[in-house]
Amino acid sequence: MQELLERRFTRVGADVQVVQDARATSVGMNGDRFVICLAAGCEAEVVHLDAKGRHLLLMTREGETKAKFLCGHDERHWFVAAVPERAAAKTVREAMIALQPLELQEALKKVRRKKRARRHNEAFVRQGEWFFIPVPDFDPAEHRGAVLEGYAPISRGWQSTPHIVRELCRYGGVTEYHVSGRIDGRRGRRIMSADEWNRLSAADRRECSARMTTRDATVHVRGAVSHPDHATITLAGWHRVRMNTENEAAAMRHVAFYD
C-alpha cells in the first residue's frame, strides 16, 4: 500500500510519508511533505487524482468508517482539507465543490460549469480556505454596532496564519479571548468567554497573554487581502466572508498539524 500511495502522490508532484500502526489515524503536512498515519487495521487509497491540477482525493477506511481528504497544491503551498461526508465526493472536482459554502449553490447556477471550482468567478473570490462573496449594496451604516477595522486579521484558529484585510466590517457574534500562558496554575492555551476573562484577577492576567476575537460575527471586507502562502487579491466593493466547509466534516478530527 505504501508504494502505491507514493506513486500516486508522485504523480501530482508531492512527497508523502506513510506511518503504519500509529496510535491514531491522521493526515497532515510536515513542511512540504504529506504525512499519513494509519492506526492498526486502517487503510488508505487515492480514489481520484488530477495530475495537471496537482490535486488528489485520498480516502481512509477503518472498518465501516470512511474519511476523505482533498490533498493538493494551492498557489504556493501544499494543503490537506477534510471533505464533508454529506457530499459523497468521488472526484477532485466534486471535493472542491463540497468545500464551497452552501450559500453559494444558488449563485453558482449562473456560473459556467467549468468555472465553478476556480479561485475566482462571478459568484466568489477565494484565497485559501476563505471565500469572499460580493455584496454590492452592503452599507456598514445600516448595521447597528458595526465595527470598522483597518488591516485586520481573519483566522480559523491557533494553528492558522491569519489573512490580513485592508478594510473589515463586523457586527453581531460572541466575544471570546484566546489566552496563552499560565492559567489556573498551569501553562497552556484556552478560549475563554468574556465573563471568564473578566473574572480573572489582575495578577492572573499578568501571567498570560490574550487576544480578543469575535466568534460567529457577520464579516464583510474590501480592498487588499494578503497572506504569505497566496497572491494578494484586491476586492472592489464589499464582500461577505465565509470559510470553506471542512469544519463540517467528521474527518476534520483526523487532520494533523506538525511543527
Image: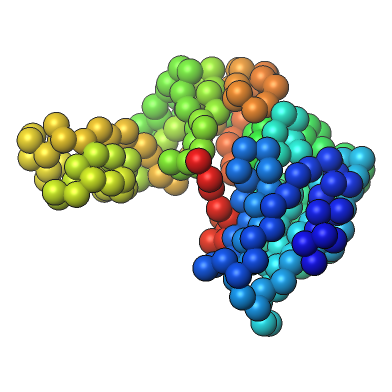
Left or right, 98 with respect to 225, comes to right
| Residue 143 versus residue 84 in the image, above or below | above
| Residue 73 versus residue 100 in the image, above or below | above
Tell me which residue sits at (74%, 67%) in the image. 44
Asked if residue 126 can be seen in this view, the reply is no
Left or right, 196 with respect to 15, comes to left
Residue 240 percent location from the top left of the image: 59, 35
The quadrant of the rendering that contains the N terminus is bottom right
Residue 71 percent location from the top left of the image: 74, 49
Tell me which residue sits at (62%, 38%) in the image. 31
Left or right, 49 with respect to 20, comes to right
**Which image quarter: residue 117?**
top right
Asked if residue 47 can be seen in this view, the reply is yes
Tell me which residue sits at (64%, 60%) in the image. 19
| Residue 215 versus residue 47 in the image, above or below | above
Residue 212 percent location from the top left of the image: 31, 34
Q: How was this image coloured?
A: rainbow
Tell me which residue sits at (46%, 17%) in the image. 150
Q: Number of labelled discs?
A: 0
Left or right, 12 with respect to 102, comes to right
Residues 95 and 78: in front is 78
**Which image quarter: residue 214?**
top left
Residue 38 percent location from the top left of the image: 64, 66
Residues 166 and 64: in front is 64
Residues 131 and 144: in front is 131
